[in-house]
Amino acid sequence: MTVALSKTDIQSFNNDGVVVLRGVFKEWIDILIRGAEFHINNPSSSALVHQEKSYQGHFMEDFCNWNRIPQYQDFVLNSPLASLAAELTESKSVQFFHDHFFYKEAYSGVETPWHQDMPYYCVSGDQTVSFWLPLESREQSVSLKCLAGSHSFPKEIRPTSWSNNDSFYEDNEAFMDLPNIDNGDFEIKQWATEPGDVVAFNFKSIHGANANIVDGLSRTLSFRLLGDDVVYRQRLGRTSPNFPDINQKNGERLREDWFPTIWSN
Ligand SMILES: O=C(O)CCC(=O)C(=O)O
């Protein structure tokens, strides 16, 4: 299934590292909600739960469930996801990398801190895209926020553990610190969204999300896809998500049996 994007959408994605696409997944929301409802009651063994003492709700994230939840699998294989990834990353073929679920209960005061995804991953390349897909209406204040242009920074941002802020790997000069985002030097892209809208962003875009302090639950699926130039990269420790038995060498295309090609032309 394909959806044609405008030149402006593709240009915004290239320049800013992020773009909002309106209504492209409208027909898939009910299906994904069914998957998410099952998922909330049946998290995987990789699920992480974050809780802030003074708030009643919790924030659960979970990874790599598309193979066991039929509605997610249907979406990955049969929705316009793959064609949109090919268009945005200007790739001839696209591999599916993984899915990441963010479930924030009402009044769960745990934010998603500013970060960049790429350094947590076992890949390198420029032709990458994540689709951040909220399953209910999202006010701007609780929507994804992205630093425009941060996908072109000269170094990766030092990855840290969200629970204690420790450096994720043995620290080294390959990484830079997060810039001071509050000093007004950066343009922040953040949109209110309706079900069916999606925010597409490069794995190198710095992004975060405020805590869900509104009276309603917040369910978001992020689907991560790999374009033509993406290859395996060995990191200096466990990645997130972690693929300990991947058995690959630097520079190889990711193995097809785990990360299938879902678009080629
Ligand atoms: O929705 C959120 O809280 C954060 C999403 C995010 O960090 C991502 O999709 O990579």
Image (tube, helix red, strand yellow):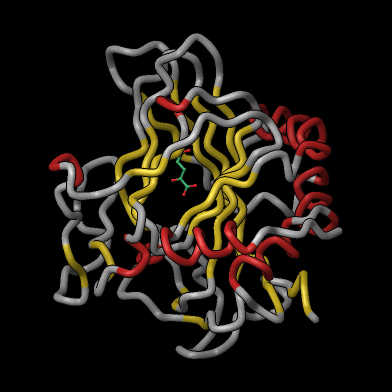
Quadrant placement of the N terminus: bottom right
Question: Looking at the image, which is closer to me, 108 or 239?
Answer: 108
- Taking the image as drawn, is residue 44 in sight? no
Residue appearing at x 40%, y 65% in the figure: 118
Quadrant placement of the C terminus: bottom right
Question: Looking at the image, which is closer to me, 125 or 242?
Answer: 125
- Residue 93 lies, with reference to residue 42, above or below; the image says below
Judge left or right: residue 199 versus residue 48. Answer: right
Which quadrant of the figure has residue 41?
Answer: top right
Q: In the rendering, at what x and y percent does residue 93 appear?
A: 71, 79
Judge left or right: residue 34 versus residue 21. Answer: right
Residue appearing at x 52%, y 83% in the figure: 231
Q: In the rendering, at what x and y percent does residue 87 appear?
A: 67, 68
- Taking the image as drawn, is residue 125 in sight? yes
- Residue 248 lies, with reference to residue 59, above or below; the image says below
Judge left or right: residue 14 versus residue 63. Answer: left
Residue appearing at x 39%, y 36% in the figure: 209
Which quadrant of the figure has residue 229?
Answer: bottom right
- Residue 101 lies, with reference to residue 93, above or below; the image says above
- Residue 102 lies, with reference to residue 140, above or below; the image says below
Q: In the rendering, at what x and y percent does residue 5 appear?
A: 70, 58
Residue appearing at x 48%, y 54% in the figure: 18
